[in-house]
Structure formats: C-alpha cells, structure tokens
Image (tube, helix red, strand yellow):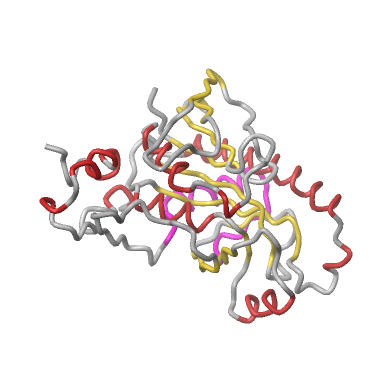
Amino acid sequence: MTCEIGIIGGSGLYDMEGLTDRREVTLETPFGAPSGPYVTATLRGRRVAFLARHGAGHRILPGELNFRANIFGFKLLGVERILSASAVGSLREDYKPLDIVVPDQFFDRTRGRISTFFGGGLVAHVGFAHPVCGDLAGIAIDAARAVGARVHGSGTYVCMEGPAFSTLAESKAYRSWGFDVIGMTNLQEAKLAREAEICYTTLALVTDYDCWHPEHDAVTVEMIIANLVENAATAQKIIAEAVGRMPAARGCHCGRALEHAIITRPEHVPADLKRALAPLIGRYLPTS
C-alpha cells in the first residue's frame, strides 16, 4: 500500500507508538539495501512508513549509512513528505538540552559521502538554497508547540563526519561561524530528498551542549542517554501531531525540484540508468 509520509527515527527513536496495521516491508534499491525494513502503518488516519536510521540495535555508523537507499526506498513506497528526528549537540547557550530545533539551514563538514542519485551519464543540479521544506517545517513547529515542547523554529545544523565528536577548537569555530546545532546525518538526507522531490524537515533533538560549553566535562553518558529517552518520547508526540495536521495535497515546490534540474539531453542518458531511476525521473525522461 502506498504511504504518504515517511518518518526517520534517529538515536533513541527506533520505533513509533500509535502505529496500527503495521507491516514490515523489505526493499532493494539500485543503490543497495536500506538501513532495515520499513514499518508501514497507519498513524492519525494517514499511511506512514517508519525507518530506523541506524538499523536494529543501532549498529550503523553515520558514515556507513546508505542514504541513497534509505531515501529511494521511501520514494518506492510513494512517500511525498519525510519527517526526520535526530540527536544533536547545541552550539548555543539558549538552545538547551531537551529543546527541539527545526533547522532551516545546513552546513556540510562531511568528507566523501555520496549525496546525489545522479552521475554515471546523467547530470542534474537541484536548487538547495533553502534545504528544508518551509511548509513541512511550519507544520512541525506548530505541532511541537501544540504538545508543549520547547521548540526553536530556525537554526543552522552543521553536519560533521564523526563518529568522534568535535575537538574544542572545532566547536569554538562552529560557534564563531554562527552555527546552532551539530549532528552527523541530516544533510545527505535533505539533499537526496530534494532530488527525489520529497518534502523534508527534521526535528533536531538537543541531548547536550557540545564541548565548547564550560560545563561539558560534567556531562555523563548516563545523562545523555536519559535525555535521548526523553527526547524520543517528545519526538513521537510531535510527529504524531504533525502527521495529523498535514493537508492532503502539497502546496510547496518540492514536488517539482527536478523540473528544470536535468541537464543531460535525453538521448544521451543510458537506457539502463533511465530504468533504474524511473521512480525519480520517469515523468521527465520516460524509458520509451
């Protein structure tokens, strides 16, 4: 069954409460296997697909994630909107642990990660000045306020390589550049979702201050885990509320992101590539 809405669960959020008619769906994509099976279900009367980003038992490093397969799988399921949740460190005193941030910008500090479906004979350049869907972000912000969460409706998420956390020098530099939160996963998801013409926004769940904070050394693993658990419970409430608030039709431009992005002349695109990417490009480059 087609799913309207995708949900990506990050650290601490490995399943969703309130899902009915659950079914696990295992998919293969032209880019390999996703992080695990998708849980397709009904939530607040809408068909959703849930994916645990790091797999069962949290066994996949950020740099090991098959971002292309994860997003392509959502496309195969018919998803038009993705709500992502991920743990982040705060780079601002006023973005406190247990706060929710809905970033409106990203900054890439990763190295060598593949963040495009294109290449191999097909060139496309999507617009990415505004990397999240403003309409979907607005719904997420309103939902967070409705459930009583402390939410910040903007911010820049700097995406680092990991798996080690920042050095003190790096953390101080990110603060001096005006960044707000730091994580390891969301940038590639956002880029690929745009190429797949899927709306994307993320709930950045603050677990702790990054190492710039003078009290950083007082933070323990136990404290972070406790915050992860509490953040996951809050995120589930926000996601359910947001799903219930989504209009049936999209009014944004995300669903037309490829309309003027494909540069390669159709007759020069390899036929096997057209077939493999048909879920993404079929309406622009038909296979026959």
Q: Foreground: 21 or 266? A: 266
Q: Position of residue 221 (x, y in %)?
A: 84, 53
Q: Along the line of sight, which residue is nearer the eye, 221 or 148?
A: 221
Relative side of 64 to 137, left or right: right
Count how many numbered circles sit on residues in the image: 0
Q: In this view, which residue lies farthest toward the right?
A: 218
Residue in the image at 57% along x and 50% along y: 64
Queried whether the magenta region covers residue 144, the answer comes back as: yes
Quadrant where the image shows the N terminus:
top left
Q: Position of residue 76 (x, y in %)?
A: 37, 34
Q: Residue at x 25, y 45 (%)?
A: 273
- Whether 110 is drawn above or below 73: the answer is below
Question: Residue 130: x percent and y percent?
Answer: 40, 63
* Picture residue at 42% right of the left edge, 32% below the top: 28
Q: Residue at x 62, y 60 (%)?
A: 183
Q: For the view shown, which residue lies furthest in the top direction?
A: 21
Q: Is residue 121 left or right of residue 254?
A: left
Query: Is residue 206 within the magenta segment?
Result: no
- Picture quarter containing residue 55? top right
Residue 3 occupies quadrant? top left
Q: Quadrant of residue 248?
A: top left
Horizontal and vertical percent for residue 236? Answer: 63, 38
Left/right placement of residue 237 relative to residue 270 reads: right
Chain part drawn in magenta: 131-155
Up-down relation of residue 193 to residue 219 (above or below):
above
Q: In the image, 78: left or right of 65?
A: left
User: The C terminus lies in which quarter of the figure?
Assistant: top left
